[in-house]
Image: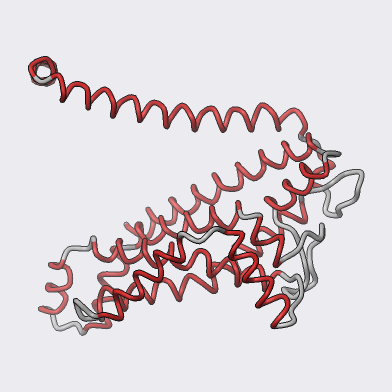
Amino acid sequence: MKAINTITLKDKLKSYIKSPFSGLLFLIVVLAALITFSVLIFLISYVLIRGIPHMSLSLFEFRYTTSNVSMMPAIINTLIMVLLALIISGPVGIFSAIYLVEYAKSGNKLVKVIRMTAETLSGIPSIVYGLFGMLFFVVTMGWGFSMLAGALTLSIMILPLIMRTTEEALLSIPTSYREGSFALGAGKLRTVFRIVLPSAVPGILAGVILAIGRVVGETAALLFTAGSVAQVPDNIMGSGRTLAVHMYVLANEGLHVNQASATGVILLGFVLIINWISGYIAKKLFK
């Protein structure tokens, strides 16, 4: 086996020597991968080095004060915001993708309009979503700065992402799965929800993970809709700040920059933990 690998490597080197352009493309690809990996390691290292020395138990007290600038209310608000946004946008995005892939006829003009709309929505800056949420949910609907207004605004933001990733996951399922199910006498609805959808779970969860990352890291849209009150609201109509908003406010004030760096560490760990849990669930469901 080692001999075969050695011969293969020699053959590749000879081919690169004979074709310098192929060798150049190979070097560019390797260099791009190394740059991407290096940037990731640099960002993580920078955040950890700047934030870990300033971690303290006072940052995890349940009640926020000007002396401890606790991030615990922000952590709880972040979890609430993620759950609300996914509960609202998850079913809508997944069911929309199921309709587009499984039920809509090919060449349907409505499908083209929906896909173009989703791509357009995914390219709109978050500050525009924030202004829309403030004008519609906060002012017009009269909800004021509230968790519900922030969650609905974020739901509109991540809806195209969930819908498009779910659509691609469903399209990647082989047609033979559907044909085999139909041959065994299963109907369209049963085939979709018992055969196709479970097989597409890893791809769907990948989109959900990306959506969670965007919700956790969003600042601009939430400043205009959910507000920046440093406490856990009594209900979803109350105002509260998430971790990203908490870090932005501390850094913007200029009085607690070190605590803002420590918050960045927790925010990074928060995203990593959510990704790990989602990946673990995806593996279990796929089995």
- Front residue of this view, candidates 91 and 40: 40
Vertical placement of residue 135 versus 82, above or below: below
Q: How is the image coloured?
A: secondary structure
The percent coordinates of residue 108 (x first, y second) are 23, 80
Check the picture and name the quadrant holding the N terminus: top left
Vertical placement of residue 190 versus 239, above or below: below
Asked where in the image residue 11 lies, by quadrant, the reply is top left
Asked where in the image residue 132 lies, by quadrant, the reply is bottom right
Vertical placement of residue 211 versus 155, above or below: above
The percent coordinates of residue 125 (x first, y second) are 54, 58
Vertical placement of residue 160 versus 255, above or below: below
Check the picture and name the quadrant holding the C terminus: bottom left
The percent coordinates of residue 187 (x first, y second) are 21, 84
The percent coordinates of residue 27 (x first, y second) are 26, 22
At horizontal 67% and vertical 77% (from top left) the residue drawn is 137
At horizontal 41% and vertical 68% (from top left) the residue drawn is 118
At horizontal 50% and vertical 64% (from top left) the residue drawn is 158
